[in-house]
Image (cartoon, coloured by chain):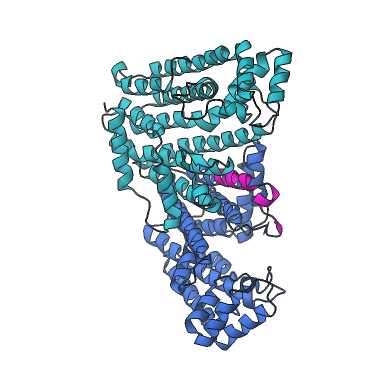
Chain colours: A cyan, B blue
Amino acid sequence: MHSLASLLSKLTTYSSQNPFPATPAELYEPCDYILTLGGKRLRPALLLMACELFSDEVEPALPAAWAVELFHNFSLMHDDIMDAAPLRRGKPTVHTRWNTTTGILSGDVMLIYAYKSLAAAGAPDLVARLVEIFNRVAIEVCEGQQYDMNFESREDVALEEYIRMIELKTAVLLGGALEMGAWCGGAGAADAAALYQFGRLAGIAFQIQDDLLDTYGDPEKFGKQVGGDILQNKKTFLVLKALEVASAADQHELRNWMNTDAESAGKVAAVRALFDRNDVPALVAAEKARFQSEAFRYLDQVQVAPERKTVLRKMVEALFVREF
Amino acid sequence: MHSLASLLSKLTTYSSQNPFPATPAELYEPCDYILTLGGKRLRPALLLMACELFSDEVEPALPAAWAVELFHNFSLMHDDIMDAAPLRRGKPTVHTRWNTTTGILSGDVMLIYAYKSLAAAGAPDLVARLVEIFNRVAIEVCEGQQYDMNFESREDVALEEYIRMIELKTAVLLGGALEMGAWCGGAGAADAAALYQFGRLAGIAFQIQDDLLDTYGDPEKFGKQVGGDILQNKKTFLVLKALEVASAADQHELRNWMNTDAESAGKVAAVRALFDRNDVPALVAAEKARFQSEAFRYLDQVQVAPERKTVLRKMVEALFVREF
């Protein structure tokens, strides 16, 4: 079994052996740029680890792993335009450094290169199956982004709709990466399906944790400004939970805060206090824990020797912080 | 053999049996909208006709034909944003009727649905081959769009670069549609390759004719404003040919006109006179004829009985007007 570092090193080698063409530079430079901003390469790592559960040969899964990373970066490039985000990982986004046109077209070609990488994954049977999973997940990711944007202008978002949104927007891709990796490794349908559920549920738990960290994270450890979601009036899991469980007066107060602008004095402290007195962080942490433990139950179901699961289990466990 | 009308009717039935989901409506309504703006469905028709050269069963080619139409409409949706085009076929473009964000995301999902339709094309062997052709062509279409945009800010575009651009941006998709159709019908590699060349070369000829019609077309028959390319200072085949063959004084005059704005009085008449006295329309028509006849030589090479080619030959011939 390879370590995470060893798998990522193989992926880096593979990607450098399969570069974008040099021309037209205006099209491909932004693709290289976003790929070097330094993400964690979580999705391809999941895919490779899932493959290694079933096979000692991880190399055949590299094209599919790279396809998933390309898809993820395509979606970041287009989401950054849609969200008008100036920065990604502290660097200018593609449409900021170049322009919107570049962000659209370079994103498009990166999505097609994801399919090109997928098409290099092996025998036609495997390619056809991977393309089918990939299509399903990619469509869901677009739908998730649409729901996320819809929610911005809606006042009546229910918690279950929010969970469905984060499931589509981010969790299914983690599940899909694991499912594809399983097929690359020669798994049967039941194990591939269990790994999909593992990734999907862990992804939901991870997004809930992300909402918790944005408001309650340690400022030293949390990369972004703590309280950013509150300032931007985001309808996070915390807000939707509060609107479910808080007293009528507190619900009213929360709605009022969410109609103020980002600079309103005392906003973060007041909203946090409101969450606290309604026990929101504990309730949300419990939901997170529920998805997390359900996720790992699916990993337990996968029919391979427990020691083969160690690397994957540890990496996913490490995504979760203890305090939530 | 089916007529064009009969093939398009089968395509319409297929597409109505494979609709986009109802929700999220914000994502899928723009996809339905652009598909009902009423294009000629040229690309899927080519694909189905290529299939019918080799097989009496055209139904199995419908998913691939619809994939090509979805791809074409995805590229229109994104190109319209990049070109800031307010209208398409006399109706508001998607980003005008909705907004840029909608145009990006609905285009993205339509591209993925193209792959989804392709994945339904049949046995894994066939799907893998179709995806490979589709990827190659789709990448080239993006590259062509990039070159087209690059040329806007370049003063030194050579005619052969322009031909390469129109080849990538539009001609390879016609070739790819024919190539995919051939494989769907069970053709061998040589026939599939010949049909690709037929479509590619006919596509280049068609684009050259498009440039001619924009300046010299019959205002009664031509859908757009005659002279529009001249008003917008587009570096068309006519302009690039004139910059190759015209006298130094006329080249200088042409460059001057191309630095004036769209409303400059007498611009269309002056540039057209300049083209005429340098014999540009005849030279360009000769280039068009060269690509056109080369295209049909490839169709002649395809190893099926000549009468099977009649429907395809007639449809492509009908794309070309006699006067150029």
Residue situated in front as seen by the camera: B22 or B260: B260
Residue situated in front as seen by the camera: B106 or A85: A85
State whether the magenta stretch is mostly helix, strand or loop.
helix
Residue numbers of the magenta segment:
B87-110
What is the number of callouts on the image?
0
A217 with respect to A301 (left or right): right
- In the rendered image, residue B292, in percent from the top left (x then y), is placed at 50, 73
Q: Residue at x 51, y 14 (%)?
A: A290
Please, which residue is most extreme toward the front here? A265
Q: Could you tell me if residue A180 is visible in this image?
A: no
Q: Could you tell me if residue B37 is visible in this image?
A: yes
Q: Residue at x 40, y 17 (%)?
A: A301
- In the rendered image, residue B38, in percent from the top left (x then y), is placed at 67, 56
Residue situated in front as seen by the camera: A1 or A102: A102
Is-magenta flag for residue B91? yes
Q: Is residue B120 above or below residue B320?
A: above
Is-magenta flag for residue A15? no
- Check the picture and name the quadrant holding the N terminus of chain B: bottom right
- In the rendered image, residue B2, in percent from the top left (x then y), is placed at 58, 58
- Check the picture and name the quadrant holding the C terminus of chain B: bottom right
- In the rendered image, residue B287, in percent from the top left (x then y), is placed at 49, 78
Q: Is residue B156 above or below residue A27?
A: below
